């Protein structure tokens, strides 16, 4: 794998996403933050108040494998850097309630603000605008494939409009008029938190899908056929509807759909990954081929360049064709692996086998750097013989697929 970083993909995309975030109303940005935090690695989130100067906007648990850290959270839609007094006020709000906090901003941090965050008690973790945008690109938040070029991503106007539409669901609670805003500021100044009722803490369909580890497209089909019932619906100008769900309903929806609980330990994560990698539920051969290609190339950090993955993915199909045992039949791009372009194979990998691993949180995909990485907490736990077993099972799955198709 090349040690040189790949050039950024669509360098203007980061700027466009930042502009979209800064263009949102204050209320809509609060809704965005409540939906964004799970993608930053937080669970058990509860929104505790409207965004206020120095207050706690949300609570959550930062999760990395089996490691969990309760946090108080503040989110700021700033154009200018966060300053030392912002961190001082936040530390004051955390004191006596949280040992750690997370400050999230669309801007960046002044040097003195960062120094205070790293040395204060309670300690403050920081997330800046560039990191927010990176996570949005990684999870395609606010992005969709261009209708004219599948390799290009466009801004998804419906995504941002969904947060604006959420304001209508709250119209009975607080108006956007100057008078009500003044009253709201006065209430915040009294340092009394404005707790949200459970029916007010809503998440969007994509966020629910991420929490359940279910493809949002599948979840939308379940909503549209009545399998899952949203708590609120708002029509969009595009003709599609935005669906909203109470955050406290996530677990009841999980149980109703008979979905697995999120693993609670590193060993449980590893076992679920191994079970998933070994499973033989095949509609196409893509998953075992990607597994075989990935683990044949993976470096010591658990990384593979997508360019190398595409090449090895193609090579495996070519080998089977040369043996007179093609892995795919009519209707698949990989029927003729030598005529498929690199871009076509890349799109197939990202949209099919890799997507399944991403949804399960087993892998990460850095689109800008063109790197696929197995989740670090899995890579630390996997033993050599387990990787060898996964590769052997992938071979078995491919042989099974060939025999089933013949």
Image (cartoon, helix red, strand yellow):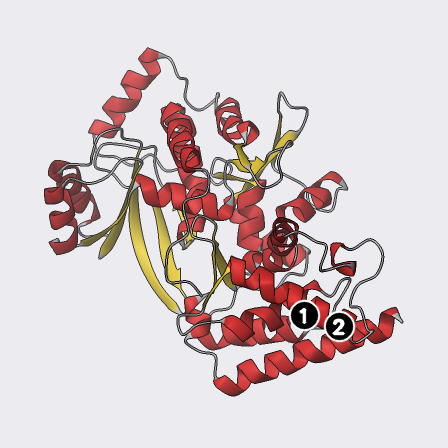
Q: Residue at (37%, 12%) from the top-left corner? A: 177
Query: In the figure, residue 387 lies in which quadrant?
Result: bottom right
Residue in the image at 32% along x and 57% along y: 70
Give the residue at mark 2: 320
Q: Which mark is residue 241?
A: none
Task: Please tell me whether residue 389 is drawn above or below residue 48 in the rendered image.
Answer: below
Between 343 and 174, which is closer to the camera in this rendering? 343
Residue 290 in the image, given as x and y percentages of width and height: 62, 66
346 to the left or right of 122: right
Q: Secondary structure at mark 2?
A: helix
- Quarter of the picture holding the N terminus: bottom left
Helix, strand or loop for disc 1: helix
Asked if one can make out residue 57 in the rendered structure from this viewpoint, the answer is no
Closest to the observer, 222 or 309: 309
Residue 396 image position (x, y, % from top left): 72, 80
Above or below for 89 versus 277: above
- Circle 2 Cα neighbour tier, 10 Å, few/some/many (<14 / 14–19 / ≥20): some
Side (left or right) of 7 relative to 205: left
Q: Nearer the viewer, residue 168 or 298?
A: 298
Q: Is residue 160 visible?
A: yes
Indicate left or right for 96 with 197 as reference. left
Residue 293 in the image: x percent, y percent? 59, 70
Q: Are marks 2 and 1 in contact (CB under 8 Å)?
A: yes
The answer to which image quadrant residue 191 occupies is top left
Relative to the observer, which residue lies in front, 61 or 8? Answer: 8
Q: Using the image, determine if residue 231 lies above or below residue 406.
A: above
- Residue 230 x %, y %: 64, 39
- Location of mark 1 (residue): 316
Residue placed at 44% from the left, 70% from the top? 302
């Amino acid at each position: 794998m090349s040690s040189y970083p790949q050039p950024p993909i669509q360098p203007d995309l980061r700027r466009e996403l930042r502009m979209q975030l800064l263009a949102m109303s204050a209320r809509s940005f609060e809704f965005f933050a409540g939906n964004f935090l799970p993608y930053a690695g937080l669970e058990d989130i509860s929104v505790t108040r409207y965004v206020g100067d120095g207050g706690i906007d949300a609570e959550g648990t930062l999760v990395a494998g089996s490691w969990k850290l309760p946090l108080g959270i503040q989110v700021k839609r700033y154009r200018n850097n966060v300053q030392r007094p912002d961190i001082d006020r936040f530390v004051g709000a955390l004191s006596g309630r949280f040992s750690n906090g997370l400050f999230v901003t669309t801007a960046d941090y002044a040097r003195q603000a960062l120094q205070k965050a790293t040395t204060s008690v309670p300690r403050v973790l920081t997330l800046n605008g560039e990191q927010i945008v990176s996570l949005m690109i990684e999870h395609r938040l606010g992005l969709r494939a261009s209708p004219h070029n599948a390799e290009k991503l466009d801004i998804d106007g419906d995504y941002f409009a969904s947060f604006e539409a959420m304001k209508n669901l709250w119209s009975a609670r607080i108006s956007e008029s100057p008078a009500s805003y003044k009253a709201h500021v006065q209430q915040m100044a009294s340092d009394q938190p404005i707790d949200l009722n459970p029916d007010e803490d809503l998440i969007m369909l994509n966020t629910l899908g991420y929490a359940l580890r279910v493809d949002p497209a599948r979840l939308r089909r379940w909503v549209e056929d009545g399998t899952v019932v949203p708590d609120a619906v708002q029509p969009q100008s595009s003709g599609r509807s935005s669906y909203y769900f109470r955050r406290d309903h996530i677990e009841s929806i999980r149980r109703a759909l008979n979905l697995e609980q999120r693993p609670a330990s590193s060993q449980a994560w590893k076992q679920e990954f191994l079970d998933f990698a070994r499973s033989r539920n095949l509609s196409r051969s893509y998953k075992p081929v990607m597994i075989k290609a990935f683990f044949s190339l993976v470096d010591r950090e658990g990384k593979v360049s997508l360019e190398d993955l595409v090449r090895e993915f193609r090579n495996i199909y070519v080998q089977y064709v040369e043996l007179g045992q093609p892995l795919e039949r009519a209707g698949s791009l990989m029927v003729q692996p030598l005529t498929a372009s690199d871009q076509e194979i890349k799109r197939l990998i990202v949209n099919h086998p890799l997507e399944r691993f991403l949804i399960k949180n087993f892998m990460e995909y850095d689109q800008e750097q063109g790197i696929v990485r197995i989740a670090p907490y899995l890579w630390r736990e996997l033993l050599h013989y387990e990787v060898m077993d996964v590769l052997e099972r992938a071979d078995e799955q491919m042989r099974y697929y060939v025999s089933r198709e013949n």
